[in-house]
Amino acid sequence: MKVLVDECAPTALKLALVALGYDSSTVQEVGWAGKANGELLGLAETNFDVLVTLDTNISYQQNLAVRKISILILRSRSNRLKDLIPYFPAVATSLQLIKPGEICFVGPKP
């Protein structure tokens, strides 16, 4: 499974996924920093299976019914690493279960 980590997520998340055996890259590494969500998803779905993001609005802004890529949204009270690290194991577990075109949430409901 190829995982793209959005630019709003820390690089530490990508490193944690790589350590668990996931083929992971960041948006910055592939040269797509600054792309709008729709454009990013269009580019990503040709090379990646899942986009991992902290952008909770993406689920309202994008129609995944026409997409092959899945989105895993990590919900946390902040994007600070100390607040995100406790959810890294759940992200890894959710990646094993997510299906193409699906949106999955990890973390508490707002």
Image (cartoon, rainbow, N blue to C red):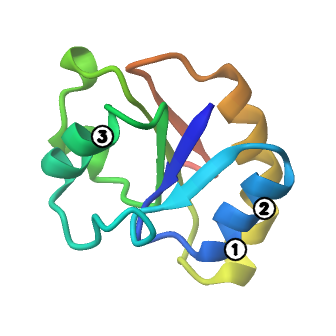
Mark number displayed over residue 12: 1
Q: Work out which quarter of the rendered image holds the N terminus and state it.
A: top right
For discs 3 and 1, the disc positioned in front in the rendered view: 1
Q: Which residue is mark 2?
A: 16
In the image, residue 27 lies at what x, y percent? 40, 63
Q: CA distance from mark 1 to mark 2?
A: 6 Å
Q: Dot 1, how many residues are within 10 Å of its Cα: few (below 14), some (14-19), or many (20+)?
A: few
| N-terminal-most mark, 2 or 3 | 2
Verify CB contact (< 8 Å) between mark 1 and mark 2. yes
In the shown orientation, is residue 26 left or right of residue 95?
left
| N-terminal-most mark, 3 or 1 | 1
Question: Which kind of residue does numbered mark 3 sit on?
Answer: Ser
Verify CB contact (< 8 Å) between mark 3 and mark 1. no
User: In this rendering, is residue 30 above or below 44?
Assistant: below
In the shown orientation, is residue 74 left or right of residue 17?
left
Which residue is more in the foreground, 51 or 45?
45
Question: Which kind of residue does numbered mark 1 sit on?
Answer: Ala
Q: Which residue is mark 3?
A: 59
Q: CA distance from mark 2 to mark 3?
A: 24 Å
Local secondary structure at mark 1 = helix
Question: Which kind of residue does numbered mark 2 sit on?
Answer: Ala
Looking at the image, which residue is at 65% across and 62% down? 14
Local secondary structure at mark 3 = helix
User: In this rendering, is residue 98 above or below 26?
Assistant: above
Q: Dot 2, how many residues are within 10 Å of its Cα: few (below 14), some (14-19), or many (20+)?
A: some
Which residue is more in the foreground, 63 or 56?
63
Looking at the image, which residue is at 26% across and 22% down? 67
In the image, residue 8 lies at what x, y percent? 42, 72
In the image, residue 23 lies at what x, y percent? 66, 45
Local secondary structure at mark 2 = helix
